[in-house]
Image: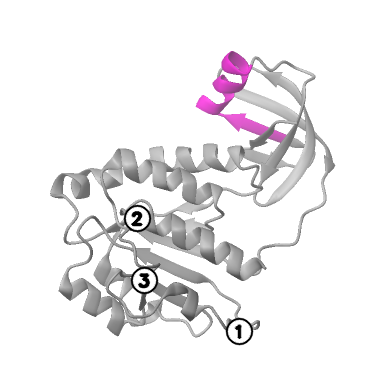
Amino acid sequence: MRRFQATECTAGRAWIRGPQAGHLSRVLRMRAGDACEIAHAGRLWAARIRSLDAGCVELDLEEELPAPAPARIELELFPAVIRFHRFEWMLEKAVELGASAITPVLSERVDVHLTQAADKRLSRWQTIARQAAEQARRRDVPVIHTPVRVPELCRPEQADSGQIMIQLNPESSVALAQLFQNIDERLSGPVRIISGPEGGWSQAEAQALSEAGWMAVRLGQEILRAETAPLAALAYLKLALTS
C-alpha cells in the first residue's frame, strides 16, 4: 500500500498540493477511487482518492490506523554544510534513519559560496526530507531548520539537563560506544549530534562547542567522510537506544 504525506488534514478529509500532486497523477498514474495511506503530523489513515489533478489531490480519510510506540529518544542532527550534492544525499539518508530534526550548520571551513547559497536551498531540502519520509514509510516529516552558525549552538540557553549533546571528533579519546555503554534508562532526550565539515572544525569552534557542553566523541579508528560520519552515528544510536 502506497503511503503519502498530506499537505493538509481536517476531519475526514486530506489534501496533497503542489508538485507532489502532479507526481501522483502523472508519474504514479493514480486515479480517483484508488486506496492509499495518508500520514500527517505523526498520525496515519487508510484513505481513498476522491479527486486529483496536476495541482491538488483530495482524499477521503476512511479509518485512522493504530500508531506504533513512539521513539523513546529523539535524535536531532546538526550536520555542517558540505558540497550540496553530498549534503543532500546525507540529508535523505538521515531522514530514512529516523532523525527527528535536522539543522544545517555553517562553520568557518564551509566554502563561502555554499554559505551564501545555503538559505536558498531550504525549500529543496524540505522536499527531499518529505520524499525520504515517504520512502521510509514514516508517519512524520522531520523539520529541516534554517542554517545556523556554530556560535548560535554555544549559547547558554542551548544547554538542557534532559539532553545529551555530542560533537563528532575523530581526535577525541572517547568512543561513542563508550559514552552510551551504560545509558541511563531514565534519559528523556533528545540526543543532539553535531558533525563537522571537510577538514573538521576549526580549533576555535571545537573549543567553543566543548565549553558549551557538546561532548567530543569518535566513531572508531577510521576517518569517515563528512557525509558518512553523521549517518554512522545515527545508525549506532538508533540501535543502542531502542534495543
Badge 2 or badge 1: first in the primary sequence: 2
Q: Residue 32 in the image: x percent, y percent? A: 75, 17
Q: Viewed as shown, does residue 220 lie left or right of 18?
A: left
Q: Which amino acid does label 1 sit on?
A: Asp
- Span shown in magenta: 14-28
* Label 2 secondary element: loop
Q: In this view, does 120 lie above or below 166?
A: above
Q: In this view, does 30 lie above or below 84?
A: above
The answer to whether the residues at label 3 and label 2 have Cβ atoms under 8 Å apart is: no
The magenta stretch spans residue 46:
no
Q: Viewed as shown, does residue 64 lie left or right of 230?
A: right
Label at residue 218: 3
Could you say which quadrant of the image residue 169 lies in?
bottom left
Q: Nearer the viewer, mark 3 or mark 2?
A: 3
Badge 3 or badge 2: first in the primary sequence: 2
Residue shown at 73% from the left, 29% from the top: 59
Q: Viewed as shown, does residue 185 lie left or right of 98?
A: right
Q: What residue type is labelled 3?
A: Arg
The residue where tag 1 is placed is 184
Picture colour scheme = one colour
Q: How far apart are marks 2 and 1 (CA)?
A: 29 Å
